[in-house]
Amino acid sequence: MGYSEGGVEMAKLLLDKVKDEALILKLRTSYNLITEDINHTQTVVSLDNLDENVVTDIVNLASGNKEMMLFETTDGWVNLNIYEINYLESYLDQVYLHDINQQTYTLKTPLYQLEERLSKHDFVRISISFICNIKYIRYIKTLLNQKLELTMMSGDKLIVTRSYLKNFKHTLML
Amino acid sequence: MREFGIILLVLLTITFLVTTYLLIKDSIWLKRLNKYRTSESLKPIKPSHNILQKRFTTLALSFVMILAITPILTFNQKIEPPFYVDKQMVNVKTVGSKEKLVSMIDNYNNYYYYEEGIVWEGNINGSADLGLDGLNPGTVVGNGDTQNNDRDFIDTNNQVEGVQEADIIKTDGNRIFYAPYGRNQVSILDISIDGTATLKKEIDFEEFYLSTMFLTDNYVVLVGYVYEKLERKATTTSGEPYFDVWYPYVYSGALYVYDKTTLEEVYVYETQANFADYRVIDNKLYIIANTQINLDDPRPQATINYQGSQKTEIVDYNEIYYFDENIVSGITAITVLDLETFETDTKGYLGRTEQIHVSQDAIYTTSTYYDYSYYNQYANTDDTGTFNWDEFYKTSIRKFRILEDGSVAYVGSTKVLGFVGGQYWMDEYDGYFRVITSTPAWVPNISNRTIYKHRLYVLKENELIDSLDTISVLDKGIGKPAVTKTGLRNDVTEEQVKSVRFNGPKAHVVTFLQTDPLYTIDLSNPAFPVITNAIEEPGFSTYLHPWGEDYLVGIGNMATSSGMVTGIKLSVYDTNTLEPLQTYEIPYNLNGYSYSYSDALFDPKAILVDSEKQIFAFAISTYSYTLIDNVYQSSYQSEYLIFKIDFNKEEIISKPYRIEHGSAKYYFNVDRGVYIDNVVYTFSEYEMISVNYDTGEIIQTLPLKS
């Protein structure tokens, strides 16, 4: 996990791919670290000083940024990291969960229950059939009919309808 | 086209404003989002170029297009009538709104009538909407194809070549259209190759009152009026009746256009105005109309029936103009009707029009008014007062240029002293507008007779502003000096102007009290008009027709040496000699009571004239009554006189052919004659008689509807 070179202790931490921007930012600002994705699943964090406390902190941070939640899908139960959920969509009587890895799960839980469960995280109901993760909004475009169009980091476009506009604004302003 | 531009500009401005608003909203939302992200320790977002590109492109495009279109629209406004390009308008302004127009009319009413507290009820103007049922389809009397385009005929006696005037008879050589006075009917005669006339059709009108006609390449344009009786009442502000009924009929000018070949009705144009005058140039009809002011909607308007649909055209307040110094007495509406496409364009100018002069390039309108500042001065002085009578009559003259596309643009105006007595008192030559004006006055401390001051103005359009500059004024010598209480005065005269005719660089003016001086004024230098000749003779001419450069033919009245009118005469003049070359007299029959009359004395269009064909022809009518069995029997007689005028012969005026049209107990007149291929067709309301122009032999007598 670590090695030293020329008297200076250098270390590299190999973590599950850090997809959380907040964590990457924190690693950079608090520990002056450089992160680098080495493949689709792993991220290398380079440390110029192998300090056990720091490593512990980082590992804690990285793992703390994972909050797993069980969802009942049509194919059984699945344990998902809620920070990786992009948005949820209900269509007809099905609810679809889209994650940031472009994977979609068909859930059996109704949307209003999911809204309740996710409300303490960064999720907001934007229309009768959509709940989105605020962290993954790239741009908010004002439309002429008093609606908003959200462009997600994934490129998907979601609409904030008039009746949920106030709620959306309120969540952002908090 | 301009309307489309304005709509586009409005749409672009809306697009620009909305896009700006949305961009601001977007940035507010972005700020909120970033605030949230910061609070969640997330990196703030900078919107990518792609996301913003659409918004900024719309914004930039609309902005650039607004910048591009605005000057084009402003430029267009400048060249569109009545504002002529490259000219600063200092005398004319746009009315723009109803309030403005009404306030100006109010000022005028207070000023003119000196009546306050009078409230008029109802529609002053009325609305003479008669639709199309005023017409009787008429009956086809004859038939036969007579089309032949190479006929040699004489057109109406127009003042200016190329500017057609309306008349009650018109021909194109193949067909004659005749609208007898008071008959409210058009008789259409086909003229065959051998000169035989057949009655093709007679069209009767019921609610349309036909006055006169134009003939174009494809159409016959009937000009007249419709009228409506009004219930118009006025009360004072305290509710007392002011008049019960005042001026109960409203006459409105109207046009009916018929296809010249099929004689089917094509187009109907009804206004709420009285036509002052009209002309046709290159298949475009120019109508100058005086709109009566209706306070409910003071704008000039017209109802048009064309191709089965009816529409009303109302002149926009932005196309009504006013002149600061003029009194607002009605609105002059100038309409251009294209007689090929039937498109119309009307502009309104505050102030009435009395006389017009139309050249191929311009329309001049005149309106005479009294300057009341001088009137008050007069009212307050006794006989020995210093009333400046010469300033009392003023005429405002406006010039409208006829542009290449036939539309009309106002280009200048001015005021002159005196009034203008008719279209022949005006002329345009070589860019100069020449006009004779006359100021009459009865001033007891000068003379017991009416005295006059006659002037010849030479005006020219200013190139920079909308005014007509006075190049010169000849204010002495037109009319013999007046014998006044203080002696002979050569700045005023007791003679009235009887006729005026301009002929290229020359002007001819006839004045009359007892004898007739015919003045020739040389205008070859417009800045210095010079009276070069004066021919004196008993009587006077009421119309002068130029015959080449130096000769004139005059028709008028004979008179005794004391000025009493004794008959009708025809005279020929050389403008370089001091006496007429020859005079042909038609004395009144003094045995019993008799009086002769000719339309030609008052209406030059009643004269059939062509200097190349040496013809000068007109009708005279005689009314007489004689005592038969102790009862006075009256009779009307009317005949058509055809003179041949040849200045190379010793006897310049030939003995005329006389074509008699019978007699009647009641009023009856030979109205007109028409020349086609050496045949003269003479018309009265009862019959048409044609004669051979060379021999005077009667060819045909054709009864018309009796």
Image (spheres, coloured by chain):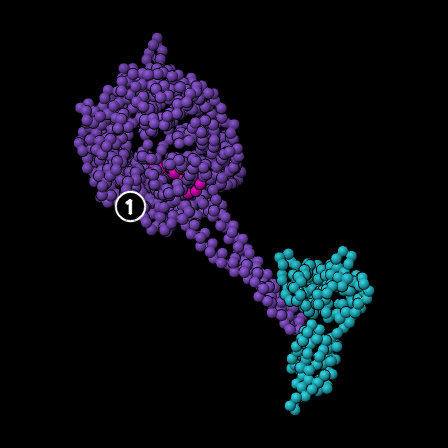
For residue B391, what is the image quadrant?
top left
Instruction: Identify which residue, B497 or B550, lies in the foreground.
Output: B550
The letter of the cyan chain is A
Instruction: Identify which residue, B504 or B109, lies in the foreground.
Output: B504
The letter of the purple chain is B
Quadrant of image for the N terminus of chain A: bottom right
Instruction: Identify which residue, B113 or B39, lies in the foreground.
Output: B39
Query: How many labels sit on residues?
Result: 1
Residue visible at 35% across and 23% down in the picture: B671
On the image, the x and y values in percent for residue A164 come to 70, 61
For residue A83, what is the image quadrant?
bottom right
For residue B686, what is the image quadrant?
top left
Which amino acid, by three-letter code, is at mark 1? Answer: Thr
Residue visible at 52% across and 35% down in the picture: B310
Chief SS of the magenta region? strand
Q: Name the residue under label 1.
A: B470
Question: Is A170 displayed left or right of B422 in the figure?
Answer: right
Residue visible at 75% across and 57% down in the picture: A91
On the image, the x and y values in percent for residue B320 come to 44, 44
Judge whether residue B603 can be spotted in this image: no
Magenta stretch bounds: B345-357
Q: Could you tell me which secondary element the residue under label 1 belongs to?
A: strand
Judge whether residue B57 can be spotted in this image: yes
